[in-house]
Amino acid sequence: MSNTGTDSNPEADPSPGTHSNAGTAVSLENVRKTYQLGEPVHALDGVSLDVPRGSYTAIMGPSGSGKSTLMNLVGCLDTPTEGTVVVDGQDVSALSGRERTSLRGTEVGFVFQTFNLMPRLNALENVALPQLFQGISRSDRRDRARELLERVGLGDRTDHLPNELSGGQRQRVALARALVNDPAIVLADEPSGNLDTETEAQVLDLFAEFHGGGTTMIVVTHERHVAERAERIVHLLDGEIERIEELEGGPEGDE
Amino acid sequence: MGPLESLRLSWRSIAGHKLRSGLTMLGVIIGIAAVIAFVTLGASLQAGVIGDISPDDQRNLYGWAADPDVEAGPGAGAQPVFSQNDLDAVGDLEDVEAAYGYAPLQTQTISDGNETVPQGDGVVASGSSYIRADTLEAGEQFESGEEQAVLNPAAAGQFEEDVEVGDELTITLLTGQQVETEVVGITDTSEGLSPFEGFENSPRVYVPTEPYYTEQAAEMGGGQQEGDGEQTGDGQQDGEQTGDEQQADGDQQNGGEGDDPQTAALAMQDEPEAEGADDAWFTAIIVEAESTDEEAIEDARDAATAYLESDESDAGEFLGDDLVVSLETSTELLQQLQDILSLLQNFIVGIAAISLLVGSIGIANIMLVSVTERTREIGIMKAVGAQNRDVLGLFLMESVILGLVGAVLGTALGFAAGYLGAWYIGLPLVYPLEYVVLAVVVGILVGVVSGLYPAWRAARTDPIDALRYE
């Protein structure tokens, strides 16, 4: 577990994680993202962060703190203006658009606040969608999707369209979809924002369960109790890492 | 992502908007249906009117004289300017095998013994080789100058007992005059034997111009010659006189009305001024070349035209700037008909092209709407690893399906319309199946052209914006 709060001394980072891809799922080094909105706005201003494999990280911060930008960068949807983002050992900035898409498809699983399921595809097809773009055969895709749906407790809902499922069920479908390619990280953006307390607990329990199975989880949230499920909380403020809060049940305590 | 997967996904989104997709296809459907319907009708029309040209027919040159400005197809505006003497002279030309006149006789009935059937047209007077030997089912060609006839199966079958070779028939002409004829042959087809007749199936009786046409012309004027005994005595007195006058004229041309061809026509048909057998005037002639070689046909055409236009011939007197001889083979004549048909077809295709253009714009428009509507879906797909080309393929596939299904539906509709049209007009139905391939290709093309820009827009959608899109 290693991190550096700001860009003050990235080279001095003593953690083996920065130097070994095997141990680091995502590594940000001195990342700056600048938008030209009349005058330049630094959405992220020198962020360095390592996310070890198998960890469970929450990212918190108020609106405009750079959470979404950070998520887009980690999710290979965007490239930094300065600095490097390394996902699963690959420098995202150095990749072509196609390679970045490919990396995103295989190594990043997204879970969104609004679920973002394809409305005309049933649960099984939604879960299988990421594999469709990886050229995996139809029967293999269906087997894998069915297996994951069973693991999230929706084995009996495979034929249902998203609008026939409850919010919690949809988010579980989305989680199954995020996991289908066995990604290096699962990136969840306010995963329980649209859920009531009970279903939120169910979904977060599932997160914990998959984390327990070895999946690297990154959850972006502004709710303290959601963030507290993680091993550590990264607090963002005005595009910089304000502080990193280690929680009980950290890597050592988490089996 | 394979094309089959794209197809599956695209089809799903089309099926999700049935009404919208149906309306979008309408432009393509109408365009394709119009083309297919008219092409089907055109092909059926060709098959029905034209039939097959016998290879042996190729040596025949069909001739008439008409105002060169008249462009209404074979024989239009033709005037009777060819005399029997002209035909005899043309027939004697070096490059010409034979030349004879062609004239439909106006008749009322045909009788076989006691049985009489009506026969208004379809009795054709011509030369003996008009009936080609290879088209005879039974018997032989009639001899010129003999009271003989060849029937086609439709004519022979009109009687309770089919007419056979050797039977005697009585033909009642329009004038009420009756003439005898012996059946010497039956043809193997009921279709017309030359472009002059038209090519549809109908009962036809072929007789030699001599004596039937020449004599009818004479009879109407009161016949100088002693006919076949059946002639009415009525006209005879007039005729005798007229004949005298004509002989005095010395110039064995048409009657006293001068050398206007129109008058010649009248003389032949209605006026009592007509001449004797030798002075029948023909509107249509047939010149046979030595062989079916293109060269032989050209030679025959040149020789016949040169003679007919010269002062030597009777026709030469009428021919000039306002009246020009045309001598054309069946193929050339059909070419004219086909030219007219294809002109019509081009016109329809032009209209259809406009419809297809409108259809393409409709598809493009609806695809742009669809891309905007599904921005979020595009974002999702890109987030989970869809490459730009996957998205492009997906939307392109969708518009191609719209174009293709539109084309297929349009083809079916066009064939149905063509079928109804052909059935209504009574043509043999011919489906131009090569147009199915063309329609499919056009449908795909329309889909690609109209879908390319919307699909490209979809492909370059930024996933970050798209995921945020409400």
Image (tube, coloured by chain):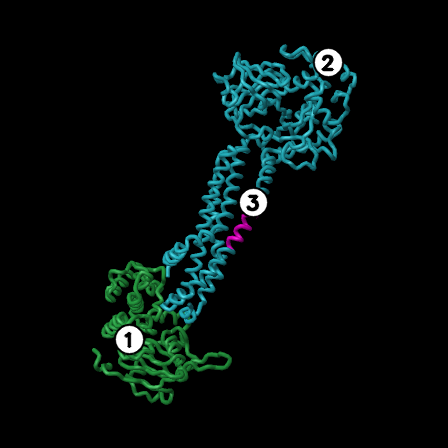
Chain colours: A green, B cyan
The percent coordinates of residue B62 (x first, y second) are 63, 30
Label drawn at residue A216? 1
Camera-nearest residue between A142 and B52: A142
Type of amino acid under label 2 = Asp
Report crowding for label 1: few under 14, some 14 to 19, many 20 or more residues within 10 A (C-alpha): many
Locate residue B277 relative to residue A201 in the image: left or right: right
Identify the residue under disc 2: B238
User: In the image, is residue A139 above or below residue B231?
Assistant: below
Number of residue marks = 3
Separation of marks 1 and 2 at Cα, in angstroms: 122 Å
Q: Principal SS element in the magenta part?
A: helix
CB-based contact (under 8 Å), mark 1 and mark 3: no
Give the quarter of the image for residue A11: bottom left
Same chain for the residues at labels 1 and 2, yes or no? no
Mark 2 and mark 1 in contact (Cβ < 8 Å)? Answer: no
The stretch in magenta equals B347-360
Amino acid marked by disc 1: Thr
Using the rendered image of the protein, determine whether residue B270 is visible from the camera's viewpoint: yes
Tell me the quarter of the image containing the N terminus of chain B: bottom left
Q: What whole-number distance in Å separates the C-alpha atoms at marks 3 and 2?
A: 57 Å
Relative to A67, is B61 on the left or the right?
Answer: right
User: On screen, A90 above or below B470?
Assistant: below
Q: Quadrant of residue B50?
A: top right
Q: Position of residue B105 (x, y in %)?
A: 62, 22
Have a look at marks 3 and 2 and say if they share a chain.
Answer: yes
Residue located at (62% from left, 24% from top): B104
In space, the residues marked 1 and 3 are separated at their CA atoms by 66 Å
Q: Residue B348: which numbered mark, if any?
A: 3
Residue neighbourhood size for the residue with mark 2, other residues' Cα within 10 Å, grouped as few (<14), some (14–19), many (≥20): some
In the image, what residue type sits under mark 3? Ile
* Left/right of residue B342 with respect to residue A2 in the rendered view: right
